[in-house]
Amino acid sequence: MSRFAWLERRAEGLLVRPGGVFLDPVRPVPLAVVSHGHADHARPGHREVIATPETCAILEARYGADAFGRLRPLPTGETIELGEVRLRLEPAGHVLGSAQIVIEHEGTRVVWSGDYKRRPDPTCAPFTPVPCDLFVTEATFGLPVFRHPPVEQELEKLLRARAANPDRAIVVGAYGLGKTQRLIALLRAAGYDRPLYLHGALLPLCALYEEHGVRLGPLLPATAGERGRVRRELAGEIVLAPPSALADRWIRRLPDPLPALASGWMRVKQRAKQRGVELPLVISDHADWDELLLSCGEVGAEEVWITHGREEALVHALGLRGIRARPLALAGYEEETG
């Protein structure tokens, strides 16, 4: 029997049997540990949820106070006992409040990574490698073609496009939790101090980030005012919106919009072309190929399980490095957040 036989794959997700707890379950369960607030990892309906205080706040903001029986905040670094296991959370560097789930049972340590990245992000705590026996990792960008460029290079592309198109609104599609706030903070760090204009759907989570000490500077609604009137005063300005808004009639209220999209998937030119993106920005909140290999090596695990993404290439590459790896192929985790 495997020394990890106390972990069981079920339709709901991965069950830690001796603790009676599921990790990022995709269906309602009695007890869940949630790594972060993205909808594919944080589903409503659980009787009790353990997560970082920031993730608990995000869940309440996104789903409402009645979506879960109980939210149980657990700050990173603090250990609790659940049945026969000890559990703590450590930073994952993905979005505000994101965490790796560290489980210890009978001398064995397992780390569930959730989604993570290794690049600097002023809006959340950085990924902390945790030595373990089993590392359960994502592989959203688990192919050698996915090597993210320096984020400064992509920001420069955005600012150059703005300077070259003073009569157009530069409309950047960015996921509402994490990507939007990171992009804003990076622009501020680069010296961009003009107001940024936001689609209304992005404003509440930006306010939540501010409440948790993340300073984003002046933010204004992009389409306030008379419905149907083009806001010509937004020519030459940067507007952030959910990616879906790039194909919505909402965008017609902006002057000659130049569509951009911030995502690791913009490395694939065909994806940008299919979505009508003129300015692809390869800015990702996930580890790229090299960072996946780095992370799997740094934690020193004897075995790696891969929850979702491009499993086969990563299994092969880790095998060449002497690390046993296998795909879990858990259903329900999306990859479009990039």
Image: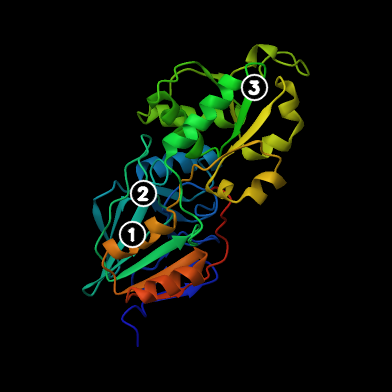
Of callouts 1 and 3, which one flags the residue occurring earlier in the amino acid sequence?
A: 3
Task: For marks 1 and 2, give the CA distance.
Answer: 9 Å
Circle 1: residue type: Ser
Q: Verify CB contact (< 8 Å) between mark 1 and mark 3.
A: no
Residue 215 visible in rendering: no
For residue 83, which quarter of the picture? bottom left
Choose between 81 and 258: the one closer to the eye. Answer: 258
- 29 shown above or below 257: below
Task: For marks 1 and 3, give the CA distance.
Answer: 39 Å
Q: Is residue 223 left or right of residue 158?
A: right
Residue drawn at 56 percent across, 20 percent down = 163
Quadrant location of the N terminus in the rendered image: bottom left
Q: Secondary structure at mark 3?
A: loop
Residue drawn at 46 percent across, 52 percent down = 147
Please give the residue where the numbered disc 3 appears in the rendered image. Answer: 169
- 226 shown above or below 158: above
Residue drawn at 28 percent across, 48 percent down = 76
Q: Verify CB contact (< 8 Å) between mark 2 and mark 3.
A: no
Residue 285 in percent (x, y) is at 46, 46
User: What number of labels is visible?
Assistant: 3
Q: Secondary structure at mark 1?
A: helix
Circle 3: residue type: Ala
Please give the residue where the numbered disc 2 appears in the rendered image. Answer: 118
* Other-residue count near label 1 (Cα within 10 Å), few / some / many at <14 / 14–19 / ≥20: many
- 65 shown above or below 252: below
Q: Secondary structure at mark 2?
A: loop
Q: Verify CB contact (< 8 Å) between mark 1 and mark 2.
A: yes
